[in-house]
Amino acid sequence: MYKTNIQDRFLNEIKKKLPANNSLAYAIEDTLHVSLDSVYRRIRGTTLINVEEIELLCRRFGVSMDALLSENSDNVLFRQAQTNDNEQESLKLKLAFIVEFMEILAAGKDCYIKYPTLDIPFFHYAQFPELMLFRIYVWHRSINKWEKMTFEKFLETYNSNENTTFFKKIADASKKIQITEIWTLNTLSPLINYLEYYSDLNLFEDNSILASLCGQTLELIEYIRNCTENKCQDFSGKKTPFELYLSSIDFSNSTMLSGYNDIKTVSLMPLPISLMYSDDKKLSNINEESITDLISKSNSINGASEKERLKFFSKLKEKVLKLNN
């Protein structure tokens, strides 16, 4: 028998990535295109997995051999989408990467997200394609990539059926995941500031665009209010827990912790839709402790009185309404 500790751990990591009702053997068979007998020889350890097979399995299931080989290292490895110089293709690759991440998470057992966030989370934006595209556009314009392209022109190019489908898949997956969000009083500010900036400088060619974006922002706020009031999200009749906390502490970074099948993942989004994540155990445990501590010092919006909850969301809506007057 050739089975090594590293091969055992490698196969175990793949198994953790699979939905609860999926067979490890069939998943490997489908990936390597070998017989089930050959698969079972690899699982039992009578056959070693070769380098080419490791690469195929790592790419298919998002397992990092580097992480397995360097468990005692101080280095942390992150995974992100592979992009190219074509802006439209890169956007699709980034969105496809997020869809894959969210759908694998949503299919896992006991899946959850805990998110201290400095901006409206991307999976909420995804329910409103035009609003999501606005957040993407203003970032790229701020670094002079699309300085000469108006938002209306940008919509003509990027508001495609394919991108809309990506957005829907992200939003739908998020509704199957238990979510805990920690906001500050400034979490809505990035979006409000961008809308205000574009409005004040008359950077919208069509005045109806601002009204449409403000309307979608109000819908987004109302959706989060309903989730908070009902303490859950609803997807096709299936309810998943939703919690919202308000922190008096303006935390300096926005790091998302997620988990499923006993796997913990730390995710960063330094740019809109530029997701990168790591399943490094030490980093995940550190972040979990930090988030748990932050929650203990925050006020539950779910648990607040109806009057206080209404007051909180009314203030958010007032900020948006002022822009459209």
Image (cartoon, helix red, strand yellow):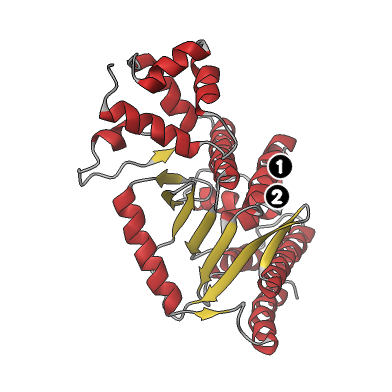
Secondary structure under badge 1? Answer: helix
- Residue 238 rendering spot, x and y as whole percentages: 73, 55
Q: Which residue is mark 2?
A: 129
Pointer 2 or 1: first along the chain: 2
- In whole angstroms, how far apart are the C-alphas of marks 2 and 1? 6 Å
**Disc 1: CA contacts within 10 A as few (<14), some (14-19) or many (>=20):** some
Q: Quadrant of the C terminus?
A: bottom right
**Relative to 149, does residue 50 appear above or below in the rendering?**
above
Secondary structure under badge 2? Answer: helix
- Residue 201 rendering spot, x and y as whole percentages: 62, 64
* Residue 145 shows in the view: yes
**Relative to 1, does residue 57 appear above or below in the rendering?**
below
Instruction: Identify residue type, mark 1.
Output: Thr
User: Quick check: marks 2 and 1 in contact, CB under 8 Å?
Assistant: yes
**Relative to 59, does residue 195 appear above or below in the rendering?**
below
Instruction: Identify residue type, mark 2.
Output: Pro
**Residue for point 60% across, 43% down:** 107
**Residue for point 48% across, 53% down:** 258
- Residue 20 rendering spot, x and y as whole percentages: 56, 40
User: Which one is nearer the viewer's eye here, 153 or 148?
Assistant: 153
**Disc 2: CA contacts within 10 A as few (<14), some (14-19) or many (>=20):** some
Q: Is residue 96 left or right of residue 219?
A: left
**Relative to 99, does residue 282 appear above or below in the rendering?**
below
Location of residue 288 by image quarter: bottom left
- Residue 115 rendering spot, x and y as whole percentages: 49, 62
User: Which one is nearer the viewer's eye here, 177 or 275?
Assistant: 177
Q: Quadrant of the N terminus?
A: top left
Residue 281 numbered tag: none
Q: Which residue is mark 1?
A: 164
Q: Is residue 321 left or right of residue 268?
A: right
